Image (cartoon, helix red, strand yellow):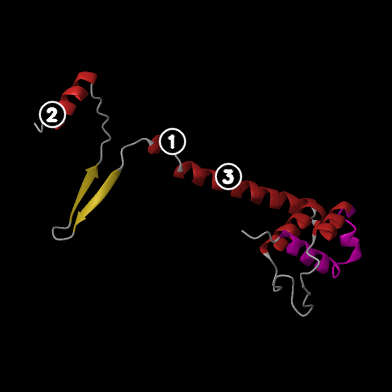
Amino acid sequence: MEDNYPKAYKEVIEILKYVPEESVNKIPQTMINTFKDKMDKEYNFSVDISKSFEEQDLLEETKAIFANIFRDYWATPYQKERIEAKEKYDRKKEEEEKRKQYNLDDIFRKKKTIIENEENNQVAYNILPVELKKERFYEKILNFLKKLFHL
């Protein structure tokens, strides 16, 4: 998996050159310095000013960084509230999907497989039981002797 964050930092720094200075000043200088220090200096990226932000060919990481910058520094209180509510809703929905997928009650139930007979259009359920058969010590010896003498 390729680490695109140094390239994304370069894209962020290049885009911030076209953002009004009052908006850039809302971002902590330490964050901007971190972007500058960790960016890929050999990566060539230029902003096409004829395109809007949404139309730019940006990395997903760059979009995520700008989403966080917008939420934390540029959004109004109402926008922050809406964004946080949406993120909370998305996390809750994801948790529910995981809970359904990895439901502990269903994990240990017997698996049912549906076998369809195409000729008769019948559906049969094949329940595959898991049976643990414990052999006693003397049964093991008897079975070994039977195998040895081909009985």
Q: Name the residue beneath numbered marker 2.
A: 146
Report, in whole angstroms, how far the alpha carbon at label 2 lies from the one at label 3. 60 Å
Amino acid bearing label 3: Lys
Amino acid bearing label 2: Lys
Question: For residue 61, what is the image quadrant?
Answer: bottom right
Report, in whole angstroms, how far the alpha carbon at label 3 lies from the one at label 1. 18 Å
Q: Position of residue 97 (x, y in %)?
A: 50, 46
Q: Which of pointers 3 and 1 lies earlier in the amino acid sequence? A: 3
Secondary structure at numbered mark 1 = helix
Q: Is residue 143 above or below residue 26?
A: above
Q: Is residue 54 above or below residue 143?
A: below
Image quarter hosting the N terminus: bottom right
Question: For residue 46, what is the image quadrant?
Answer: bottom right
Q: Residue at x 84, y 53 (%)?
A: 31
Q: Name the residue beneath numbered marker 1.
A: 104
Q: Name the residue beneath numbered marker 3.
A: 92
Q: Which residues are magenta?
A: 5-29
Question: For residue 29, what is the image quadrant?
Answer: bottom right
**Does residue 107 appear to the left or right of 45 in the view shown?**
left
Estimate how packed mark 1 is, as few (under 14), some (14 to 19) or many (20 or more) residues with alpha carbons within 10 Å. Answer: few
**Does residue 126 appear to the left or right of 48 in the view shown?**
left
